[in-house]
Image: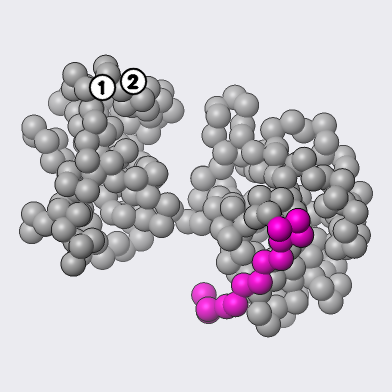
Amino acid sequence: MPSATLKIFLVHADAKRLRTAELSNWTGKAIAAPRSEFDGLLARDEALNSGVYFLTGSDPETGKDAVYIGEAESIRDRLKSHLEKDFWNHIIFFISKDENLTKAHIRYLEGRLIEQSKQTARAVVKNGLSSGSRLPESDREDMEIFLEKIHQLMPALGADFLVPPVSSSTGTSPQKILICESKGIKAMGTVSSNGFVVFSGSQASLDVRPSAHKYPYVMNLRQKLIEDGTLFIGNEALVFKQDTEFPSPSSAATVIYGGTANGLTAWKDKHGKTLKEIEST
């Protein structure tokens, strides 16, 4: 993805409130706002245009991040119909400043975005199936470029559910693979842009340390990972069924050890060099 200059305008001088975002040499534009500023967002001229939109929040059944992805020939009219949905607390929508997005274009974008969001699995996608739209080859290529720009802008607007997680299957450099070992168990992973990823097949202690009782977060997190199928109980250890991202190296090591841990010293490269030492060089 090429480098780009990002321009974010804070309408009320507050990065959490209504804001617009644009990239250099791109005809698209993003508008984002919390649900509390719904009326102000709809009052903007951009809301009259066709485009794609995202409603983000938390899934009430699982507590996980959730997103609804839609398309509309009039963003303003369509968003009004979503006030009955109570899971979302933030809106982001994308339009084209040259008004060249047709119904077929936005249906294509919607279908691709739903597909990509399900693949990354960072959030519960609240949509049903989307048929998308077939486009001529030239139009399809234009929309793929539009998608690329959406991917660039979304994290800057506080939404990372389109970001593919680091995976053991995507060819992580051996120099970046770290190991965490304790009492016969072994886990492997790597630092990611969102924290730390533990690779599928890694092990975690069946038992918990005394410190886990002092800090119930450890036990609660391990139990949650077991219940949602991320960890399964093996003969001698808990085993990660899939690549799993944690907010920090320490939170990952805590689950593996079954008690509090310092991730900067628990994770080491193949030469025994700790993450702390690696980061200080």
The residue identified by callout 2 is 216
Above or below, 4 against 203 in this view is below
Q: Is residue 2 magenta?
A: yes
Q: Residue at x 57, y 39 (%)?
A: 65
Using the rendered image of the protein, determine whether residue 140 is visible from the camera's viewpoint: no
The residue identified by callout 1 is 212
Q: Nearer the viewer, residue 8 or 253?
A: 8
Cα distance in 3D space between marks 1 and 2: 6 Å
Q: Residue at x 68, y 82 (%)?
A: 25
Examine the image and state in which quarter residue 63 appears.
top right
- Residues at marks 1 and 2 touching, judged by CB atoms closer than 8 Å: yes
| Residue 63 falls left or right of residue 50 | left
Residue furthest out toward the front = 13
Instruction: Say what secondary structure mark 1 lies in.
Output: helix
Magenta span of residues:
1-13
Q: Is residue 123 magenta?
A: no
